[in-house]
Image: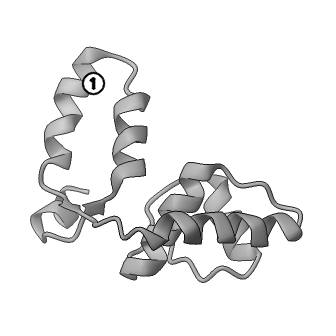
C-alpha cells in the first residue's frame, strides 16, 4: 500500500472511512494506521450513488444475493469512479460472479 500511496493512487470514500474507523481493535493500531489514510484521495458522493446502490442491491437480490449496504455503496463508488477495490470481503467477489464488472485488486 505504501507504493500506491507514494504514487498518489489510493482513494477512499465515506463507507470505507466508516469501516476503517470501526475496525480498529486498539487505540495503538488506530494511531499507527490512520495517518496512512490522510494521503488518500477522497471520492465525491454524487446523490445518485445512494439510489444506484439500492438498485444494485435489488438487482442482486433477484439473483438470490444479499449484499451488505456498505458493500453496495462501495461497489457503486468503484463503478462510478472506475476505481479498483482492494478488499478480502467475499461480497465483492460474489457481485463479480453475478456479472457486476467490478475491478478487484
Circle 1 SS class: helix
Instruction: Place residue 100 in its image quadrant.
Output: bottom right
The percent coordinates of residue 27 (x first, y second) are: 26, 16
Q: What quarter of the picture does the N terminus occupy?
A: bottom left
Instruction: Place residue 96 in its image quadrant.
Output: bottom right
* Vertical placement of residue 23 versus 95, above or below: above
Q: Is residue 67 visible?
A: yes
Q: Residue at x 56, y 68 (%)?
A: 51
Instruction: Place residue 81 in its image quadrant.
Output: bottom left
The percent coordinates of residue 9 (x first, y second) are: 21, 71
Horizontal side of 100 relative to 105 (left or right) equals right
Q: Residue at x 66, y 55 (%)?
A: 90
Instruction: Tell which of 88 and 11 is nearer to you.
Output: 11
Badge 1: how crowded within 10 Å, few (<14), some, or many (20+)? few
Count of numbered circles in the view = 1
Q: Residue at x 65, y 49 (%)?
A: 68
The percent coordinates of residue 48 (x first, y second) are: 47, 72
Label 1 sits on residue: 29
Q: What quarter of the picture does the C terminus occupy?
A: bottom left
Instruction: Tell which of 81 and 7 is nearer to you.
Output: 81
Q: Is residue 105 visible?
A: no
Horizontal side of 15 relative to 53 (left or right) equals left
Horizontal side of 35 relative to 74 (left or right) equals left
The percent coordinates of residue 73 (x first, y second) are: 52, 60
* Vertical placement of residue 21 versus 37, above or below: above
Q: Residue at x 35, y 51 (%)?
A: 14
Amino acid at each position: 500500500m505504501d507504493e500506491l500511496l507514494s504514487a498518489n493512487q489510493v482513494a477512499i470514500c465515506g463507507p470505507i472511512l466508516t469501516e476503517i474507523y470501526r475496525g480498529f481493535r486498539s487505540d495503538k493500531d488506530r494511531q499507527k494506521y490512520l495517518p496512512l489514510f490522510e494521503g488518500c484521495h477522497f471520492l465525491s458522493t454524487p446523490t445518485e450513488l445512494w439510489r444506484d446502490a439500492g438498485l444494485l442491491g435489488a438487482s442482486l437480490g433477484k439473483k438470490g444475493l444479499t449484499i451488505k449496504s456498505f458493500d453496495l455503496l462501495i461497489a457503486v463508488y468503484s463503478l462510478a469512479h472506475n476505481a479498483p477495490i482492494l478488499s478480502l470481503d467475499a461480497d465483492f467477489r460474489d457481485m463479480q460472479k453475478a456479472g457486476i464488472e467490478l475491478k478487484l485488486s
